[in-house]
Image (cartoon, grey):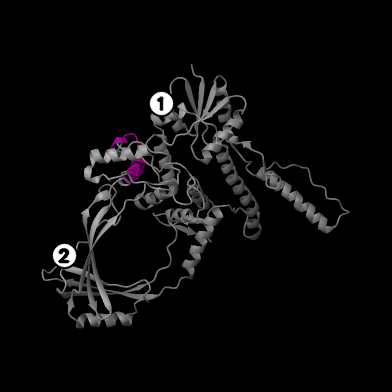
Amino acid sequence: MTNNLVIVESPAKAKTISKYLGNEYIVKSSVGHVRDLPKGQTKKTKKRTIIPKDISEEEKLKLKSQNERIRLVKRMGIDPDNGWAVEYQIIPEKEKVIKELRKAAKNVDRIYLATDLDREGEAIAWHLKEALGPDKFEYSRVRFNQITKASIMESFSDPKEIDADLVKAQQARRFLDRVVGFELSPLLWKKIARGLSAGRVQSIALRLLDERERLIQEFIPKEFWEISMNLYNAAEQSIVFSLSRKKSDPLLSEDEAKKIEQLIRNNTLSINEIIKTPTKVKPKPPFITSTLQQAASTRLSFNVKRTMRVAQKLYEAGHITYMRTDAPSLSVESIQDARNYIQQNIGEKYITNSPRIYSSTENAQEAHEAIRPTNAFIKVDDLVESSDEEVKLYKLIWDQYIASQMPDAEYLSTSARIFINEYIFNAKGREVVFDGYTKIAKNINQNQVILPVLSEGEELSLDKLNLEQKFTKPPARFSEAALVKELEKKGIGRPSTYAQIISTIQDRGYVDIQNRLGTLFQNG
């Protein structure tokens, strides 16, 4: 007999979880939020505010302002002037969902609230409890960061209470969003045009875009020249030597470039110095929300919204851990899982002496794990029921996770130098000594230039001299991924809000997408 009701957020998640729980549980979905602040529209009434005739103009303006404030507070559903009193409403589209949940709850002993494990999920759990009746049922809160049988059974064996602090944190953010939006938007209507909107984070994102656009518009290109030469060694192998310049050096002028050209033609070209330096490159941490969005943009051409939609499907299918997180840390079990895979499938030499530990940044607020596969041994070929885009994103996540527990890539960097008066020409090359983590996660710039065997004092002959006129370029416009990175760097927004912020400013016509990389072009 079914005597427990489990409520999750999405139907897909409900379907997956119901497979792991026995007949004693019925699993239902809330389909996201069920309660929220009013939508901001109030019913028009014929009742008018009567303003006494025998009061001064100053008092009339004051009374009018007070009445406008009362109407604004009513539309907001929250009163910042009186202890932040709040009026929540069942979302109209969710009336039917609440009715079905109440019907399902009639004959159960306990209700398990299994919404997502971030602040938004905690708030949804609390709203469900309030909507169904906080005193009518026994409630338990269960949390899991991956939809696997082991994780689910563990969470149900030790249920918790709703975290009131997380609920308050979500409410604080929601209240501020509402107040900032409702108090700023009318100002935009008066000063610019009706229909515009402002928001606590949305407006800052727009400011970043606007500041960048101003820099671009004000930018004045400056001419500079680049010079390089193709030289032959005795074996007639061509090597490219480029003029070495420091960032602090002034731009190379045409006159100076031509002066250097004459020096090259009038001097014997022989190698003055060869420097060989062993270098190591560490693997990157497992993905967090922002870095996954950035990587999916540059490597898969997924926009932010698409990335989160696909990641949600992978999470609900039980393939990856929760995809809204700002912590790159891994659990002890998941580290061991990755190391076991590496040992069995890649080789002993690709196992580090000790596990790699990744810590959160200073601004990180969530205590969740990084985004990773729920099982290191499940590869893309095993995702037979997944779509092509799910397979691509899963591979990206899997590669980063496994590589994060592998050794450094080791290289031998070679620099051959030719001195011509005060000018230095460099030819650089790098050869792989040990591929390390790049055996799994290929570097974007992994093509190695390997120099032929050279020796100091060796004389080279000029094959081709390259003089190229160039102009400085303005700062690049933000792509979706770059804007997320900038917001994260400045501590603006949270993993759960990046996609929504970017969608909002696009939907309202403030910016347009310019190319396949998702470059944001500001309108107006």
Q: Nearer the viewer, residue 220 or 16?
A: 16
Element assignment for label 2: loop
Residue 476 on the magenta segment: no
Q: Residue at x 53, y 57 (%)?
A: 206
At label 2, the amino acid type is Pro
Element assignment for label 1: helix
Inspect this view and state whether residue 15 appears: no
Q: Which residue is mark 2?
A: 452
Q: Nearer the viewer, residue 317 or 412?
A: 412
**Label 2, label 1: how many angstroms apart (C-alpha)?**
60 Å
At label 1, the amino acid type is Tyr
Q: Nearer the viewer, residue 439 or 483?
A: 439
Where residue 19 sits: x, y (%)? 41, 26
Residue 188 against residue 454 in the figure, above or below: above
* Span of residues in magenta: 381-401
Residues packed near mark 1 inside 10 Å, few (<14), some (14 to 19) or many (20 plus): some
Where residue 37 sits: x, y (%)? 62, 41
Marker disc for residue 20? 1
Q: Nearer the viewer, residue 127 or 471?
A: 127
Residue 396 on the magenta segment: yes
Residue 67 against residue 454 in the figure, above or below: above
Where residue 305 sits: x, y (%)? 45, 46
Looking at the image, which residue sits at the far top?
1
Marker disc for residue 392? none
Inspect this view and state whether residue 348 appears: yes
Is 53 positioned to the left or the right of 23 in the image? Answer: right
Looking at the image, which residue sits at the far left?
235
Q: Residue at x 52, y 62 (%)?
A: 210
Residue 28 against residue 361 in the figure, above or below: above
Q: Residue at x 22, y 42 (%)?
A: 348
